[in-house]
Image (cartoon, coloured by chain):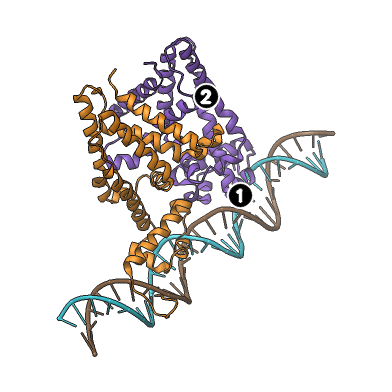
Chain colours: A orange, B purple, C cyan, D brown
Amino acid sequence: MDLATGKRTLDPERTREGILAAAHEEFVAHGLSGARVDAIADRTATTKRMLYYYFTSKEGLFLAVLERAYSRIRSLEPTLDLSGLSPAAALRKLTDFTFDYHADNPDFVRLVQIENIHFGRHLRMSDAVGRLNVTVIELLGDIIARGCREGAFRHAVAAVDVHMLMSAMCFYRVGNRHTFGQIFAVDLDRPELRAAHKQLVGDAVLRLLTAD
Amino acid sequence: MDLATGKRTLDPERTREGILAAAHEEFVAHGLSGARVDAIADRTATTKRMLYYYFTSKEGLFLAVLERAYSRIRSLEPTLDLSGLSPAAALRKLTDFTFDYHADNPDFVRLVQIENIHFGRHLRMSDAVGRLNVTVIELLGDIIARGCREGAFRHAVAAVDVHMLMSAMCFYRVGNRHTFGQIFAVDLDRPELRAAHKQLVGDAVLRLLTAD
DNA sequence: GCAAAGTTTAACCAGATGGTCCATATTTGC
DNA sequence: GCAAATATGGACCATCTGGTTAAACTTTGC
């Protein structure tokens, strides 16, 4: 609705994206069950009816928000240029990127946590997400293969497993910062601590792969 | 209520624990917002009114469930006997325990995830939990100090940070098994994979601390 | 054996919740 | 220009939700 003319403006793409952005905020703030459809509609320039028009249900909307979040991180990884680097340097750079992305995007971490609380029920209905994510493993697999060939890395570890441990360390300190911070009386958001942890995670990943 | 005699039985301790057990199940299954107070009451031998009598509110009940979950894991750690072992062996044993506890108790992992989705709001009101958890850091600190003295470990890493990375690796593969499993088409519950990961996490922790 | 404290029951409620109905406006294809 | 397809608005609803009221039963202390 155009306020100046009183005329209705038809802009489906804009409406869709507006709903997604509003839903993202609300889901991040309150979780899936805690989020209120009316509250999402209120954050929007349009009405509740439109959410159902475009996304069928609250759960359909959540899936759309989740897919959008995954596609964002995956679109960034390919922009890293690792080809000119040594295997060790490339691995460090990829780890640094992963660390920073998680630290800078707690929203993404929260959405993934929420989806896991709900047993991955929504992701299971998405075929897009699987294909999207394989790229990281390929990227990592190339680095590891090169490192093994050059004798810098040991053969012991599969790319998926390295990715898992790397993600784990980056994910945990963001996703669990409230409980961990409370229990051990530390503020994980402090810049110095963040820098120290970034170094540490990089060390851990490299040391795991480096040949003795 | 005794069904045979029609007489009411007064057993507050049993009632309390019955409510906690029922609430634990419901929260684990549906999250905090998704859990229904009526559903908790239905799992119970008593009525909804009793939940409020003992725990004031839904959130008070959740906090009680959470504290109960933390106290369980912390009561087990001291039973590990690490004194006779070399620093490396002790560290491996502690890591193995942490790994197994997380893998065997996905409920605990879920409750912590749920609390983080809610910004650690409940834990912040609990003074007990902080004191409870320091023991792990002391335990780990002793092992590291001994390792440094003997020249087996490097000085670089603080006990809290080691605990964080260790927990991260153990926590992630349980907490995120639905999304991770779906995206990379692996079943993290498979025994062989579990064993491989246990070895891997132990390696990662040891390699991080071992002097070069 | 009785009064106070502690424990338990069942019915009840005001407000919120996800979702739908129906009418209407705009755009597109021809 | 006009009919079909696409978008949009706002009121409406059945059901569910966390929480409460009021009253009664059981145990404890003396």
| Visible residue check, residue A44 | yes
On screen, residue B141 versus residue A130, left or right, reads right
- Marker disc for residue B159: none
Of labels 2 and 1, earlier in sequence is 1
Residue located 44% across and 32% down the image = A197
Residue that label 1 marks: B49
Determine the chain carrying the residue at label 1.
Answer: B
Report whether mark 2 lies on the same chain as mark 1: yes
Determine the chain carrying the residue at label 2.
Answer: B
Residue located 25% across and 30% down the image = A86
| Mark in front: 2 vs 1 | 2
As helix, strand or loop, the secondary structure at mark 2 comes to helix
Give percent across and percent down for residue A168.
Answer: 38, 35
Examine the image and state in which quarter residue B46 appears.
top right
Q: Quadrant of the N terminus of chain A?
A: bottom left
Give percent across and percent down for residue B125.
Answer: 61, 41
Which of the pair A61/A184 is nearer the observer? A184
From the viewer's perspective, is residue B28 above or below residue A56?
A: above
Examine the image and state in which quarter residue B110 appears.
top left
Give percent across and percent down for residue A122.
Answer: 34, 50
Examine the image and state in which quarter residue D28 appears.
top right
Q: Quadrant of the C terminus of chain A?
A: top left
| Visible residue check, residue B3 | no
Report crowding for label 2: few under 14, some 14 to 19, many 20 or more residues within 10 A (C-alpha): some
Give percent across and percent down for residue A2.
Answer: 41, 76
Report crowding for label 1: few under 14, some 14 to 19, many 20 or more residues within 10 A (C-alpha): few
- Marker disc for residue B137: 2
Residue located 35% across and 39% down the image = A98
Residue located 36% across and 34% down the image = B173
Q: Amino acid at mark 2?
A: Ile
